[in-house]
Structure formats: structure tokens, C-alpha cells
Image (cartoon, rainbow, N blue to C red):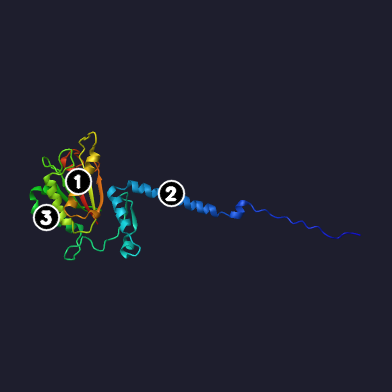
Amino acid sequence: MEDNSKILIRRRKKKSHDEHHGGSWKVAYADFVTSMMAFFLLLWLLAMVAPEKRAAVSEYFSNFSLFDSQSQQSGASILNKSAGVLEIGRPKPKESFPLKEGKKTTPQELAKMMRMAIDDKLQAMKNQVLIDTTPEGLRIQIVDNEGSDIFRLGSDEPTEKAVQIIRLVSENIREKPNRIVIEGHTDSAPFKTVQKTNWELSTSRASAARRELENNGVDPGRIARVVGYADQELLVREDPKDPRNRRISIILLQ
């Protein structure tokens, strides 16, 4: 008797590891590498930016709000290719330099007010107070002159002239809401003792100016940064030992 039954052989096709997972991991890895590249590019750009630009970046992100339409409109980052620097758009404060009358005033208007106050009360020292505006805001520089120092030689103790100037500056800025940056600068004359170099000297002088501001009624909470630059940011670049390079900068941030 013949057996007509057929034997069926079922072969299972084994899927490879790549077929099971597909290529999705490659996409994720490519996204990760791209993100890291963008991150390190950002770090490189920030390293190339001047300190005042970095301060502007910090101030922008400190005040940014998703619920503030002005922040959203002015929050775009702009790469200024012609200048080769990174410029960050920052939110415009709702009230910029408010006056007691309720008016708004610009850094230029406040600079004019400061010059008038200097002319009125410190005429004899007006050539030691330089007032201008920068991308950060209003800058007031108190500088040495030949034979007329604002700090005692090799010391962070302000002279009576410096005390008078800082007192007048305090009177004109203590009612303003703006945060304040204080910078110390020296000339390029070598200065080195056992405990101090121009770096320590410029920093301690900036901190001494901060104390004078606070003693004259400026809110300590408004101080955003106190820093010393030694002789790295000269005012008179053609003469690194010019006494005007020895100075204190007080900046009211926009």
C-alpha cells in the first residue's frame, strides 16, 4: 500500500539585527553629533566676544520672558558677519531710566544730566570724569591725571577727589533701576609686590569703588559685576603708561 502523504518543510527566515532595528539609530546619532557641533561652535563664538558683549548676553537671558512680547520680538540673535562679532538682541525694559516725573530717559539724556552735574559741582575735576555710551549702556569713567590721582600709589584707598566724584555719581544714579558694572583698570607700568600685581590692584580698586557707591545709598542688589582688567583694556593705547589708563569705569546697564 502506497503512502501518498507529503512531507512539508517550513523554513523560517532569520531577520538580521539591522533589519530588526532599521536605521533609526543612525538618524539619532547624526542629530546628536550635529547638536554637539552647534554647541561647541557657540562656545567658540562666545570665547571670541568681548567681555561687554558677554555681559549683554547674560543680561538678556536674565531678563527674558516667554510671556513678554517685547522679549520675543527683540530676542533674536544676530551674527554680524561684517564686524566678526556675535550680537545678541536683548529685551527693551518697560521703563528705561525713569525720572521722578514719570518720563523715560535714554542713556544719552542721562549722560547729559551727568555732565551738567559735573560742570555745576565739580568743575575743577571735570577733566577726570569721562562720560559716554556703549552697547552695554551709560559708562562713567573716573581717570587719573598727571599729578591728580584717584587712588593712592599702589593702594586701593581712594583719594578725596575720587570720593567726591563717586558721591556725585551716586546722587545721580541711586534712584535708577539699572544694574551696575564696576571695572578697575591700571596702566602698563610694572607693579608687583609679594601679594599684588596689576590684576589684584585693579580688582581691589573696583571693589573699593563699589563700597563707595553703596556707602552713598546705591542698592547693593543692583551691582551686577565687579571686575579688574589690569592693563588689558587701555584707554590711551598709543601710550600704555599714560596716567589716564588708571581708571574706574561705572557702567549702568541698559
- Separation of marks 1 and 3 at Cα, in angstroms: 23 Å
Mark 2 neighbour density, 10 Å: few (under 14) some (14–19) many (20 or more) = few
Return the disc, 3 or 2, that comes first in the chain's sequence: 2
Q: Mark 3 sits on what residue?
A: 117
Mark 3 neighbour density, 10 Å: few (under 14) some (14–19) many (20 or more) = some
Q: Which mark is residue 130?
A: none
Q: Nearer the viewer, mark 1 or mark 2?
A: 1
Q: Nearer the viewer, mark 1 or mark 3?
A: 1
Task: Tell whether 56 sits left or right of 238.
Answer: right
Q: Nearer the viewer, residue 188 or 99?
A: 99
Return the disc, 1 or 3, that comes first in the chain's sequence: 3
Task: Give the position of the C terminus as an image quadrant.
Answer: bottom left
The kind of residue on which mark 1 rests is Ala
Task: Tell whether 181 sits left or right of 116.
Answer: right
Q: Mark 2 sits on what residue?
A: 37
Res. 89 in view: no
Are discs 3 and 2 less than 8 Å apart at CB? no
- Separation of marks 3 and 2 at Cα, in angstroms: 52 Å
Task: Say which residue appears at 34% left-offset and 46% top-offset.
Answer: 47
Q: Which mark is residue 208?
A: 1
Q: Nearer the viewer, residue 130 or 239?
A: 130
